[in-house]
């Protein structure tokens, strides 16, 4: 009798264990989606992108993204630096329908070219600010302090305050995993070196 009761108890405990582990897996699964790669073979940059449902103010989202890694590559808030990159993100549904996500873009208020609402924008990776996909009427800096960029599920951008929509509702975030980008000076030296090699070859 005692033994049977004990067995029943063990079975009940292990069942609950399975349920609890299942719940833990489920809840942690909600926070991050599966990273998707924009492969070099398909014309991409080889980087990975992962949507996180975490709703954080921009600075905390930026810190969170930088703490993530995938396949040994460091994360950062995503930088959309070309129309092709933006189109790729839409094609794979990187931002689930009905969601918005922080990008790694901010307005440098001390930059020499700063002016509201459209100038002084920078990427967290120091990539050149040459491509933009602002939504209609954006950036507007309205009502004030909109110095960070969100990406919509449809691909357009909007400037928002660090605290998010209406200063109370932070977007989710999109992490990009990429190889560290070479310093411009290193890239330039490499380019000059390669050009020099080309000249020497041609002289032979
Ligand atoms: Ca602004
Ligand atoms: Ca705005």
Image: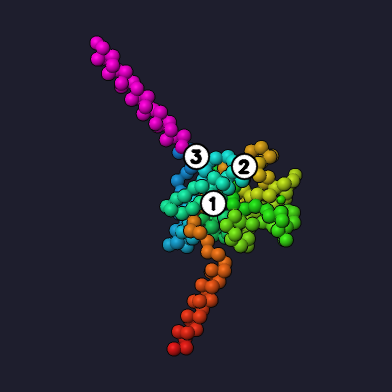
Quadrant including the C terminus: bottom left
How many C-alpha atoms fall within 10 Å of the one at disc 3: few (<14), some, or many (≥20)? few
Check residue 4 for magenta coloring.
Answer: yes
Using the image, determine if residue 180 lies above or below residue 193: above
Looking at the image, which is closer to me, 195 or 43?
A: 195
Say whether residue 60 is left or right of residue 47. right
Which residue is drawn at the image coordinates 47% and 88% (left, top)? 203
Residue 37 x/y as whole percent: 45, 54
Q: Which residue is mark 2?
A: 57
Tag 3 residue: 31
Q: Residues within 10 Å of mark 2 (few under 14, many from 20)?
A: many
Residue placed under numbered mark 1 in the picture: 76
Q: What residue do we see at 61% from left, 46% from top?
A: 59
Q: From mark 1 to mark 2, how far is it between C-alphas?
A: 15 Å
Of 199 and 49, the residue lying toward us: 199
Q: Secondary structure at mark 1?
A: strand
């Amino acid at each position: 009798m005692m033994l049977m009761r004990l067995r029943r108890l063990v079975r009940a405990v292990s069942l609950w264990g399975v349920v609890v582990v299942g719940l833990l897996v489920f809840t942690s699964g909600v926070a991050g989606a599966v990273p998707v790669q924009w492969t070099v073979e398909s014309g991409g940059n080889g980087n990975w992108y992962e949507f996180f449902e975490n709703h954080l103010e921009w600075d905390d989202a930026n810190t969170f993204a930088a703490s993530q890694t995938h396949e040994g590559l460091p994360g950062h808030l995503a930088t959309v630096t070309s129309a092709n990159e933006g189109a790729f993100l839409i094609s794979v549904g990187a931002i689930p329908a009905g969601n918005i996500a922080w990008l790694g873009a901010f307005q440098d208020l001390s930059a020499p070219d700063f002016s509201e609402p459209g100038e002084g924008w920078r990427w967290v990776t120091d990539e050149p600010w040459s491509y933009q996909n602002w939504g209609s009427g954006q950036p507007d800096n309205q009502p004030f302090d909109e110095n960070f960029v969100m990406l919509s599920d449809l691909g357009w951008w909007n400037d928002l305050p660090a605290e998010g929509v209406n200063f109370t509702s932070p977007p989710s975030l999109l992490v990009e995993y990429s190889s560290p980008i070479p310093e411009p000076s290193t890239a330039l030296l490499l380019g000059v070196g390669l050009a020099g090699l080309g000249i020497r070859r041609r002289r032979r």
